[in-house]
Amino acid sequence: MQLAKKIQPGGGSAIREIAKKTVLNPNIISLAGGLPSPDSFPVEEMRACFDAVLSKQGRVALQYGATDGYLPLRELIASQWRGRGVAIQAENVLITCGSQQGLDLVGRVLVDEGATVFTESPTYLGATQALRAYGPAFVGIGSDQKGLVVDALAERSSACGGGRAGLVYVVPNFPNPSGRTLDAARREALDHVAQSRGLVIVEDDPYAELSFDGSSLPSLLSLSPGNVIHLGSFSKILSPGIRLGFVIAPVHVIRAMEQVKQGIDLHTSGLTQMAMATLLESGFMDGHLQRIRELYARKSQVMCGAVRTHMPPSVRFEEPKGGMFMWLTLPEHIDTTELLPKALAAGVAFVPGAPFYVEHPERNTMRLSFATASDSNIKTGIERIGSLIRGCT
């Protein structure tokens, strides 16, 4: 059977291919997957919320619902953002099946074939997978300890010349894979460059609440609500299994996405949305977020200590300040894609850095995740990777 031309052979996620090799093998320590810790899942609280919805509004929850989402949940999200100084209403919010669906809707509604999409390098692999089906031209923009290098964006967007306005895709807080937060000055500069070049900013922000010290920077949405598509998610702060996210955007964009979503899945699970609204109204989240921050901060420190102990000095890394990931740069002669089979044979998995680049991949990089592995497995896994790296030098 012949597949559609837009389906690219071998175009799946490199991370999920690694996961297939590790998930059923108890002898492999996985520092590869970007999975939240199951220890953070509020099982009993979620059970209580679902029970409350089914006992009080069961027939409503089990019926078809509105495509744009359960109104009380949209109002709660809008109210939260108004508290952050962003003047939005429920009509600016669309509920999605995870923020990954939001990325697909961005592609369907805003990306024409040949349009330019600027991304940070490295960037979230799932975003490029979601958008690639709509035929954009990806342009990678370098990053450093302060996040995306906005001067480079200004230069490359100017060089692209005229044509249809494109997008800038950015994960501003503790992104997968690099963990590099976009600093305040660059956020303002990015807003200026995007508006002057006619570029729409897609702000994908699933990790903002995972700052270890609880601090935050102004969102890009707060700087320019009319020029930003904001993607939010409950996957990293509650559970990925509930598949619940949201888009905040100008009303005409939300209406276009709503029209497209009707043809995809009609609506996101009404039962899940109602349970989420119940949970948010309960006041549970503040204490829950603090517990997750403390959990990931401790695991991050375990990994940092192991890297300092077991990796050669030639390996560079930045100590995470939030999120779930650590990004390593190895000596230039080491290709981490070639190193991976040796690591799997040694009983440890990581993600090579090359798939996270849309152009000019840096093959001497790797992504590690500290979120899911136990402390002892983090230490043992890092020791095994360090031994392999030392054997390459």
Image (cartoon, rainbow, N blue to C red):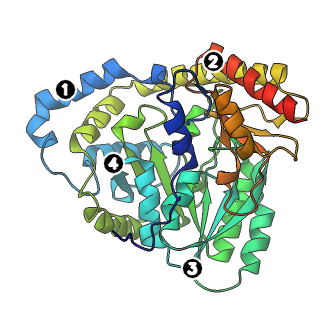
| Labels 1, 2: front one | 2
The three-letter amino acid code for the residue at tag 4 is Arg
**Residue 43: which disc?**
none
Q: Is residue 367 in view?
A: no
Whether residue 151 sits left or right of residue 26 in the image: it is: right
**Where does label 3 land, which residue?**
114
Q: Residue under circle 4?
A: 74
Q: CA distance from mark 4 to mark 1?
A: 19 Å
Q: Is residue 226 left or right of 212 when viewed as pictured?
A: left
Q: CA distance from mark 1 to mark 2?
A: 39 Å
Mark 1, residue position: 52
Badge 2 marks a residue whose secondary structure is helix
Give the mark toward the camera: 4 or 2.
Answer: 2
Residue at x 79%, y 35% (from the top left corner): 318
Of mark 4 and mark 3, the one earlier in the sequence is 4
Q: Residues within 10 Å of mark 3 (few under 14, many from 20)?
A: some
Q: Residue at x 86, y 30 (%)?
A: 391
Q: CA distance from mark 2 to mark 3?
A: 45 Å
- Foreground mark, 2 or 3, reads 2
In this figure, which residue is indicated by the disc labeled 2? 377
Expressed as whole percent of the image width and height from the top left, the position of residue 152 reads 79, 65
The answer to whether mark 4 and mark 1 are in CB contact below 8 A is no
Of pointers 1 and 3, the one earlier in the residue sequence: 1
**Mark 4 burial class by Cα count in 10 Å: few <14, some 14-19, many 20+:** many
Residue 48 found in image quarter? top left
The residue drawn where x is 57% and y is 79% is 114
Disc 2 packing (10 Å; few <14; some 14–19; many ≥20): some
Q: Is residue 203 left or right of residue 380?
A: left
Label 3 is placed on what type of residue? Gly
In the rendered view, would you say 299 is above or below 177? Answer: above
Q: Where is residue 156? Give x, y as percent.
A: 76, 72
**Residue type at tag 1:** Ala
